[in-house]
Image (spheres, grey):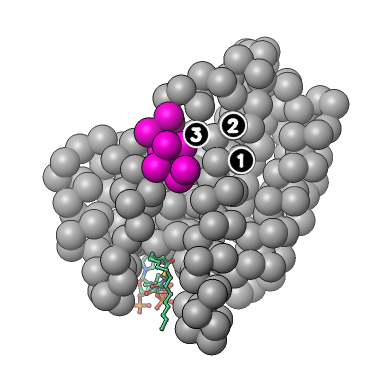
Amino acid sequence: MCSLEKRDRLFLLTLTGDGEHRLNPTLLDSIRSAVNQIRSDPSSLKSVLITTSHGKFFSNGYDLALAKSDPSLPFIMDAKLRSLVADLISLPMPTIAAVTGHASAAGFIFAMSHDYILMRRDRGFLYMSELDIELKVPLWFMAVIQKRIGSPAARRDVMLTAAKVTADKGLEMGIVDTVHSSATETVEATVRLGEEIVKRGSDGHVYGKMRETLFREVLHSIG
Ligand SMILES: CCCCCCCCCCCCC/C=C/C(=O)SCCNC(=O)CCNC(=O)[C@H](O)C(C)(C)COP(=O)(O)OP(=O)(O)OC[C@H]1O[C@@H](n2cnc3c(N)ncnc32)[C@H](O)[C@@H]1OP(=O)(O)O
């Protein structure tokens, strides 16, 4: 599940527990509910969202075991993740993912649906595993990849070699903004960045509309 904490003008959304934070309908609903709670907070127009997680996984992607148990679930999970990503794109505040563990497939897409990614150096991969697990990536995932991974070579490595991208490699690829020595350091740096951004005092409505325009192809692809 996830928890939501307000620290001054920062909202800290944490995927809790030591599991893999596999994206299933329950977790996706829980995250979306937290994002809606943030959106309805009176201070939301002058705040920042930080998303992080407990344990060695940021999110290890869809809960495939569950998905295989009911043929309707893959569609439900996909629809819920699309809605969550659209919510993050329209959220009237800057968003930062503090990636303190592995972010795989849908979990990687979730991380890239934030404006900034700060990541720990010593553990954790950014990993589009679909080639390895022989699942075709949905078109809307590709729209996110296209938008957040600028170089053709990096996109090829991520998608067509299923590279397990470390934080340092992610920095080189332009996916990660800053790299840190530990999970604690990563979260602390994310809070500092959030506080810096809050000081800029940008209007959240304008920021959210700007991001919607920047990601209009992703929103179109999500449908
Ligand atoms: C019939 C119906 C079918 C329906 C199917 C559903 C369809 C759904 C619709 C279609 C959707 C398509 C899109 C799919 C989206 C998805 O999300 S699908 C689910 C995807 N998820 C996965 O595939 C899981 C992928 N994860 C993994 O493979 C592993 O968990 C991992 C990320 C590779 C981590 O492995 P693990 O062994 O647990 O890792 P560690 O023990 O932490 O590390 C392994 C070794 O690597 C070293 N290491 C870790 N981090 C670093 C680092 N940053 N730098 C250097 N080294 C690192 C670590 O020390 C370990 O080394 P050793 O100790 O020497 O082993």
At 49% from the left edge and 71% from the top edge, which residue is drawn? Answer: 74
Look at mark 2 in the image and give the residue it sits on: 90
Left/right placement of residue 122 relative to residue 189 reads: left
Left/right placement of residue 137 relative to residue 121 reads: left
Q: Which residues are magenta?
A: 215-223
Residue 219 in the magenta stretch? The answer is yes
Residue 191's mark?
Answer: none
At 38% from the left edge and 33% from the top edge, which residue is drawn? Answer: 217
Secondary structure at numbered mark 2 = helix
> Disc 1, disc 2: CB below 8 Å?
yes
**Quadrant of the image containing the N terminus:** bottom right
Would you place residue 41 above or below residue 166 in this image? above
Which amino acid type corresponds to the residue marked 2 in the rendered image? Answer: Ser
At 76% from the left edge and 56% from the top edge, which residue is drawn? Answer: 3
Which amino acid type corresponds to the residue marked 1 in the rendered image? Answer: Asp
Please provide percent x and percent y for residue 219.
46, 37
Secondary structure at numbered mark 3 = loop
Q: Quadrant of ligand 1?
A: bottom left
Look at mark 3 in the image and give the residue it sits on: 115
